[in-house]
Structure formats: structure tokens, C-alpha cells
């Protein structure tokens, strides 16, 4: 198995044919309707359209690794589901995952939890800022960042990303000025970035750290998509710099995106500074949610222990889907442009040449193309004229979606 995994891990994702060396069937179009799936059963409530191919909610239409299902089945068969805590094996599995995949040594005493990362962001905002304080984000970005800030009566400061040569960049002069002028208390970084697919490089991360240190800003790095980077060497966790920046750093991650476990509600909150962690844990205790979901613990531990080969293959499949979309759009729908992506299974498509308002574009995609996607304005400044599409689905479904989009646009 280890020889097999090493070979798959070394693939140039998306180049080798999907049928080569695969142990998992990601082409299976498994029915999700009738399961309470937000993505499939609640399109009308979530995005306003029904009878569409759902490509919106950020989960995968693939079964989780069989090893996770097996471990969960064992726990179910035990039959007693009382209150549970994180075991030593859970801690070891997460620590080993970081060591093996990123070469980072994290410590057990750094690790806390949350039911999910959005919940954790709410706790962090409450623990480390006061009402009226300013918190910085980089739109277009995951919409829950802004929502959490506003819901806790804080003010949003924006450092919009800049699109250059089909790739987004950080305007560092604007970043420093916004932090300085607004006395920002917290900077929520999305790394890798949702929805634009950037993986921030070493130079960019060092600049971010330099600015945050200069103005004593708490840096919260949301790294939930960190395992879904197509060139493994590109992703740099902020934990890589904990020795020089541990006093102002919180890193959020989870097995939920990595192994498709979103419904099991368990996030890892990693805080190298003892006083910062104590403050977070105190806020967590106030929430009454400090004890994690029993199945989230079992599934996450199993994923970290046994899920590496599945992850390598699913990334290969997703990269193939991304390449398919990029080639199809360039050849068949030249009015659209797909932004180059380095990570995640979410692609960001520029539809501005269709010359539609955002409401017209939303209606066109939902009613004419019959696709369920995320409208760009949801992600804030810079999202107008764009859509976000989830490609973590069987290729046959994606092919149908792209053909629907082409036919609808051809009829304009």
C-alpha cells in the first residue's frame, strides 16, 4: 500500500489517465436527494432555484474513504453514544498528519476544537475584539467571514484582492494602510483562498506576518482547504512560522473538506501561544460547545490515519475535472474565462463578457442553464460578474453541466 500511495502521490495531477492506478470509483454518480443534503435537497431555499444540477455547497459528491466508514460502523455497532472527548489517538493522528504532509511539528497543547470553523471564527471575534472594533478581510472571499464580523457588531475593513493576468494578488500597500488607518484588531486570512483558488506563497506570507507584527494584529488563518492543493510543495501553513509569530496566530483547519465530512461538525483550532489558547478555550466554554461530536472524532482520526491514498486519488480526479472545465470553456464558451486555480475544488468563472447585471446572470444560470451555482456578489467586493462552481462531482455530471451552460449561452 505504501509503495502504491507514494506512486499516486507523485503523479502530476490531471495528466495521467483517471483509470490508471485507481482504487476508488469517483465516477459513481451516487444519488444524494432524499438524504437531507443541503446541496441537493435545499437548492430552492439556498439559491432560489430548483430542478438544477447543484454545484454550489462546498462538499463533494464522492463517498468518504472506506476506512472512515469502517471505523464509524464499529463505533455505531458499539451502540452507546454518551459524551466523548478527544482521545490520545486523535491527537497523535492530527500531529502525525501535519508532520508527514507539511513537515510541521505541532504540539498537543496547541490543539483545541470547535463544532465548525465558522463557529470558531465567532468565538475568536468575541474573545479578541470589542464591539465596534474593525476586522480585515480580503474579498472576494468566503461570505461567512463578513457575516460573522457583522453579526457580532464589529466593523468590516476590506483589502480587496487584485486580478492580474488571470490570477489574484494582494495589494500590500493597501493592506498596511487599511490596518494602520482602521486600527484593525484581527485579520482573517483565507489560505488557500475561497473562491479564487490562490495558495499564498512564501514571500506573500512573510509580508503578511511582517505587517501583522508591526501593528500587533491577530492573524487568523483559515486553512480548511490546505490539503486540497494540487502542487503539494506550494501550500505553506502559517504554523510554519509559529516560532517567530506564535503570539498573534490562530490556525483553523478540519478534516471536513479533506475527507468530505462536513456534516460531522469538528474543526481543529491550533493556537501555539498558551495565553491566546486559554482565552479561546474560555470563550468556547461559555458557548457550551466544548465537547466535540463523537462521530467527528472517529471519522477525523480515521481519515488522518488511513486516508492519504484516497486523498491523493481524489485530488487527481478533481484536478482532471478542473482541467476539463478549463479546456471546455476556452474552446466552447469563449465569452467566459475561468480563473487559474492552485487549490480547492471550487472554480471561479468570469462571466462579465455576457454583459448581464448580477440579477440577470443569476436568473440566466438558474433558469436557462439549469445550474445551481454561487453568485459572485455573495463573496463581496470584486464578485460582481462572477460565479463559483463546485467541481467535486462525477465527471459525467460536470460534462452535463458544461454542456447546459454552452447551450444556454449559444441561444443568447
Image: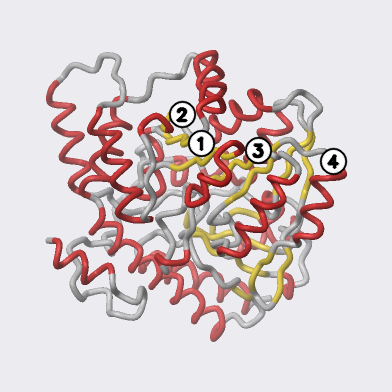
Q: Are the two marked residues, 1 and 3, in contact with CB atoms closer than 8 angstroms? A: no
User: Disc 4 to disc 1, how far (Cα)?
Assistant: 25 Å
- Distance (Cα) linking label 4 and label 3: 14 Å
First in residue order: circle 4 vs circle 2? 2
Cα separation between marks 2 and 3? 19 Å
Where does label 2 land, which residue? Answer: 114
- As drawn, which residue projects farthest toward the right? 181
Q: Is residue 304 left or right of residue 75?
A: right
Left or right: 308 as drawn, with respect to 52: left
Residue 74 spot, x, y in % from top left: 13, 31
Q: Is residue 294 left or right of residue 1?
A: right
Helix or strand or loop: what does disc 4 sit on? helix
Instruction: Return the residue nearer the eye: 387 or 153.
Output: 153
Q: Earlier in the sequence, mark 2 or mark 3?
A: 2
* Proximity of marks 4 and 3: CB atoms separated by less than 8 Å: no
Front one among 205 and 241 = 241
Quarter of the picture containing the C terminus is bottom right
**Quadrant of residue 205 in the image?**
bottom right
Residue 9 is left or right of residue 335, and the answer is left
**Residue 218 marker:** 3
Find disc 1 in the rendering and name its residue: 117
Q: Residues within 10 Å of mark 2 (few under 14, many from 20)?
A: many
Q: Nearer the viewer, mark 4 or mark 1?
A: 4
Question: Where is residue 306 shown, x and y percent of the image?
Answer: 20, 48
- Which residue has dot 4 on it? 182
Q: CA distance from mark 1 to mark 3?
A: 17 Å
Residue at image coords 78%, 35%: 134
Which marked residue is nearer to the observer: mark 4 or mark 2?
4
The image quarter in which residue 219 lies: top right
Amino acid at each position: 500500500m505504501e509503495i502504491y500511495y507514494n506512486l499516486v502521490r507523485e503523479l502530476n495531477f490531471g495528466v495521467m489517465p483517471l483509470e490508471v492506478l485507481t482504487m476508488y470509483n469517483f465516477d459513481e454518480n451516487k444519488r444524494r436527494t432524499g438524504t437531507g443534503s443541503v446541496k441537493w435537497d435545499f437548492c430552492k431555499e439556498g439559491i432560489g432555484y430548483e430542478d438544477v444540477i447543484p454545484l454550489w455547497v462546498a462538499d463533494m459528491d464522492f463517498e468518504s474513504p472506506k476506512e472512515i466508514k469502517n471505523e464509524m460502523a464499529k463505533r455505531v455497532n458499539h451502540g452507546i453514544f454518551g459524551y466523548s472527548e478527544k482521545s490520545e489517538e486523535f491527537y497523535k493522528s492530527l500531529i502525525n498528519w501535519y508532520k508527514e504532509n507539511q513537515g510541521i511539528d505541532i504540539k498537543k497543547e496547541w490543539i483545541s476544537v470547535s463544532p465548525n470553523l465558522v463557529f470558531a471564527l465567532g468565538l475568536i471575534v468575541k474573545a479578541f475584539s470589542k464591539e465596534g472594533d474593525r476586522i480585515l478581510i480580503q474579498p472576494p472571499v468566503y461570505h461567512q467571514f463578513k457575516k460573522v464580523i457583522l453579526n457580532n457588531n464589529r466593523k468590516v475593513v476590506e483589502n480587496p484582492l487584485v486580478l492580474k493576468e488571470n490570477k489574484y494578488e494582494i495589494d500590500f500597500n493597501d493592506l498596511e494602510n487599511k490596518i494602520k488607518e482602521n486600527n484593525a484588531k484581527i485579520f482573517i486570512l483565507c489560505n488557500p483562498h475561497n473562491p479564487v483558488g490562490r495558495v499564498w506563497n512564501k514571500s506573500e506570507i512573510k509580508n503578511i506576518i511582517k505587517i501583522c507584527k508591526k501593528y500587533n494584529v491577530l492573524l487568523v488563518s483559515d486553512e480548511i482547504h490546505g490539503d486540497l492543493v494540487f502542487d503539494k510543495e506550494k501550500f505553506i501553513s502559517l504554523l510554519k512560522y509559529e516560532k517567530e509569530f506564535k503570539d498573534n496566530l490562530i490556525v483553523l483547519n478540519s478534516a471536513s473538506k479533506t475527507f468530505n465530512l462536513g456534516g460531522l461538525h469538528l474543526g481543529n483550532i491550533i493556537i501555539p501561544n498558551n495565553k491566546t489558547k486559554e482565552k479561546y478555550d474560555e470563550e468556547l466554554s461559555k458557548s457550551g460547545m466544548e465537547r466535540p461530536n463523537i462521530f467527528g472524532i472517529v471519522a477525523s482520526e480515521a481519515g488522518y490515519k488511513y486516508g492519504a491514498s484516497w486523498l491523493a486519488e481524489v485530488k487527481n480526479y478533481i484536478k482532471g475535472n478542473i482541467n476539463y472545465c478549463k479546456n471546455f470553456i476556452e474552446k466552447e464558451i469563449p465569452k467566459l474565462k475561468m480563473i487559474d486555480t492552485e487549490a480547492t475544488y471550487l472554480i471561479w468563472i468570469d462571466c462579465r463578457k455576457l454583459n448581464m447585471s448580477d440579477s440577470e446572470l443569476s436568473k440566466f444560470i438558474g433558469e436557462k442553464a439549469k445550474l445551481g451555482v454561487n453568485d459572485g456578489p455573495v463573496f463581496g467586493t470584486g464578485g460582481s460578474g462572477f460565479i463559483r462552481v463546485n467541481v467535486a462531482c462525477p465527471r459525467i455530471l460536470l460534462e452535463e453541466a458544461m454542456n447546459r451552460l454552452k447551450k444556454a449561452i449559444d441561444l443568447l
